[in-house]
Image (cartoon, coloured by chain):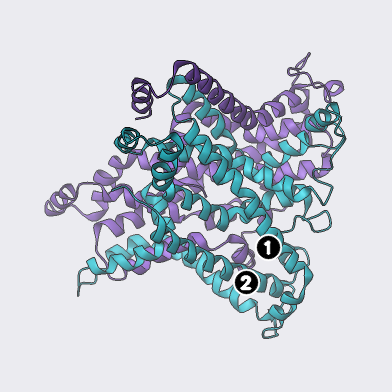
Amino acid sequence: MTDIQADLARPLTLARATPAARERGTFTVLPWLYLTPALVLLMVWTYIPLVEAFQLSFYQWNMLPTAPQRFVGLRNYQRLMALPEMRNALWNTLYYILGLFPMSVIIPLFVAIWTQDLTGRARMIYRALIFVPMIVAPVVAAILWRWLLNEDQGLITLGLEGLGLGRIGFLTDPKYALATLTWITGWKLIGFSTLLFSAANAGINPSYIEAARIDGASRWGIIRDIRLPLLSPTILLLSMMTILFGAQWSFAYINVLTNGGPLKSTTNIFYLLWEYGFQTMSAGWSSAAGMIAFAGFAVIAAGCMWLMKRYAVYDN
Amino acid sequence: MTIKASETSRAAGLVTPKSGRLRRLAIHAMMILLSILSIFPIYWMIVTSLRPENETFSTALWPANPTFENYAFVLTRIPMLEMLVNTTVVAAATAALQVATGLFAAYSLVRWRIRLAGLVHGLIALSWLVPFQVTMIPNYVLASRLGLLDTLTGLVVPNAVAAFAILLLYHAMRSFPTEILEAARIDGAKSWRILWQIVTPNMGAPIASLAIIAFISAWNEYFWPLLLSRKPENSVVQIGLQMFMTQEGNLWGPLMAAAALASLPILVIYLILQRHVIESFMKSGIR
């Protein structure tokens, strides 16, 4: 794992570590001048809006500049918690995340371990090919799969029919739409995760493997007792990414392909925020739902960071 | 390292030649499957886009009579070229600004030990955890107040800084030998000159990595343009693509041609800089 990934995964420990090293009693303007562009932009476009969204979550407002904002206290939150839509969106968010795990962590992990002996030209070619989905734009990915899965003439539909399995409404049947969108989200990640695991796996000191082999460890024993523990930082990092961002990654596919339907079956929490905000124009509801999501994910992020510190095995 | 591991396993006689060959075969089969899965949808996009209208639904792996008529159709229907130019401008400006703000901030954090450095670091790193959908309404209100709706500037400005850009450059700079910085400082070089003449020229590799990632992510950005853009000619290609899909969603040939045009620049960059692109993304993680 790289420093940056470690940093992004552990901002809090970093925040605590640095002040000890500072010089006392000197204050110069120059360093702050260099920091100004970054800090001003972060304040104006991230932190102040976050505070404003928090405030908005206690108001009723239809987003028209001329319309008044009416204070409603906690009513937005109460209404949201009672809405079946909200519960449905939260469940779907969980499905997206759990559904992504096989593609963003589990399969890549085993593919990486299993294919570690690959070398030379073949390895480079596979590497170049499986990385491609990562750089394909989400809108393009959505359109590609919309064509392949098209219910009338899509290649996969024709293939299924050839096998005598009949047509499946991948994007129009509430039973399958969520799984389809999860698959498209995962399609972009599977190759990248595999490469990340391969790199981490190749970085394991071969003398550990050698020593275990001399001790008569089996292939599976080596994987279980040496490789998996030493891969744990990457496993935890990718798991954390999937949990925190999985539902956000799927946003583009939902908006391009299903608009949250059929029958709300693909609406996740981030899509719900967007619907409340820019389709039904209820800024208060959107902000309240946003705060619930943000608080929830912040708690999960803190938990993940704690887990990473506690359980990740680093080979120093 | 992997070479060594496999050699030793062979040398130790743990893998008999026959089962070894079978295993290799299985490994290749698995990787070929994964490669096809990754690349086939894109291949199918290109093939479909090159088919004449009466062949659109053919399942042949290559069009019998390849033609560019779908591309011509797209160019007459939507302002595709304008949108490609817009997207290039937006992505290049975003990348340049992320490099600039990142360089300044990273330099400040490496060169000086300021009070509140921990807080600054925390603010930068944690901004990454704030989902954009949570701040979108205040951002939208601010953008409309500043008159940034339906402008390219509006698409760039909120993305002019990125936590990962600052942290990437921060780590790269931290490994820069401090003796050189000290020497320059003792020689009386101003911090500005040290940054441009000493630090930046040595940051070529991380700056290039960052620029590649920033350009590609800005090119693929969808959500913010979705909020901001009104007219296709003022918008980026992702929005144009979605509009085209909504209007002509079942003209599969032209739709694939539009998608191909929208991804062409990125695919070309990837073909040329393939190893750099992969390594840049692996170094900085997913975003």
Q: Earlier in the sequence, mark 2 or mark 1?
A: 1
* CA neighbours of label 2 inside 10 A, class few (<14), some (14 to 19), many (20+): some
Residue B3: image x %, image y %? 37, 25
> In the drawing, what numbered circle is on residue B107?
none
Say which mark, if any, is on residue A269.
Answer: 1
Chain under numbered label 1:
A
Inter-mark Cα distance, 2 to 1: 10 Å
The answer to whether residue B151 is visible is no
Residue drawn 44% across and 61% down? A307
C-beta proximity under 8 Å, tags 2 and 1 = yes
Residue situated in front as seen by the camera: B187 or A62: A62
Q: Vertical placement of B227 versus A215: above or below?
A: below
Residue under label 2: A292
Tell me what residue is drawn at x 84 percent, y 57 percent.
A263
Mark 2 belongs to which amino acid? Answer: Ile
Query: Which is more toward the observer, A184 or B162?
Result: A184
Q: Quadrant of residue A11?
A: bottom left
Callout 2: SS: helix
Chain (cyan): A
User: For the N terminus of chain B, which image quadrant?
Assistant: top left
What shade has chain B been given?
purple
Front residue of B101 and A165: A165
